[in-house]
Image (cartoon, rainbow, N blue to C red):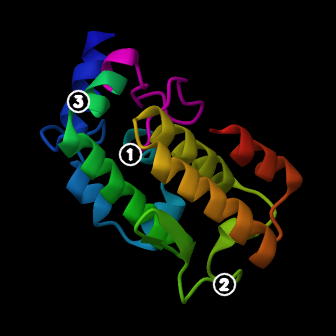
Amino acid sequence: MMQNDTRLIAFYRGEAPDHQGRMITDLWALSPFWLEHTHDYIQWLFPIPEASRFNAFAPVLTPAVQAAFKEDTTMREHQQRSLAVMLDFFGLERRGDTIVAGPSLSMQTHIWLKAGGHNHLRITRIIRSLALCHQETLARAFQDAVITIGTQRGVVSETSLAYWRDAF
């Protein structure tokens, strides 16, 4: 388990790559197309305690890694940068401690506003990871935004909304 902890902490500090040799800064620079069609990065950017069903190489969030997030400002700042990348992908913007719809948000270009799919799983993971990594205010802001915006501007299923509500 220590290897998992060391690997994830080093990745999040920008000191070591993920299982594909990508540094955290490489992931931040990826295009929206790449973010949509690649499925093995989200577990690195937003770790949770459960092993991924989709990425056997992904590390898990252990108590040691949670403690590192609590103590290490750089790790929390890096997770905030990871969130900024995903907010842009979702057509959302962070304004201080709130998250709002961006000017380009639409159901045509932001498929998370549709009934289901892997982006709904990603949203649940992001909410949980932020909360578990000592970013409760951001977790709540993201949770509130996706629930509100998803119901007002999309056709998000009750099932997804329930997962998002229960994530934190």
Residue 161 horizontal side relative to residue 84, left or right: right
**Callout 2: 10 Å neighbours few (<14), some, many (20+)?**
some
In the picture of the structure, the residue carrying the numbered disc 2 is: 106
Rendering quarter of residue 168: top right
- Residue beneath the point at 19% across and 44% down: 74
Image height of 105 relative to 149, above or below: below
| Residue type (three-letter) at the residue carrying disc 3 | Glu
Mark 2 in CB contact with mark 3 (< 8 angstroms): no
Rendering quarter of residue 153: bottom right
Cα gap from disc 2 to disc 1, whole angstroms: 25 Å
In the picture of the structure, the residue carrying the numbered disc 3 is: 71
User: Would residue 4 be counted in the magenta stretch?
Assistant: no
Q: Which residues are magenta?
A: 46-65
In the picture of the structure, the residue carrying the numbered disc 1 is: 45
Q: Which residue is situated farthest in the bottom direction here?
A: 103
Specify whether residue 39 is in view: no
User: Dot 3: what SS?
Assistant: helix
- Expressed as whole percent of the image width and height from the top left, the position of residue 113 reads 72, 70
**Nearest to N terminus: mark 3 or mark 1:** 1
User: Would residue 52 be counted in the magenta stretch?
Assistant: yes
- Residue beneath the point at 67% across and 71% down: 111
Image height of 2 relative to 155, above or below: above
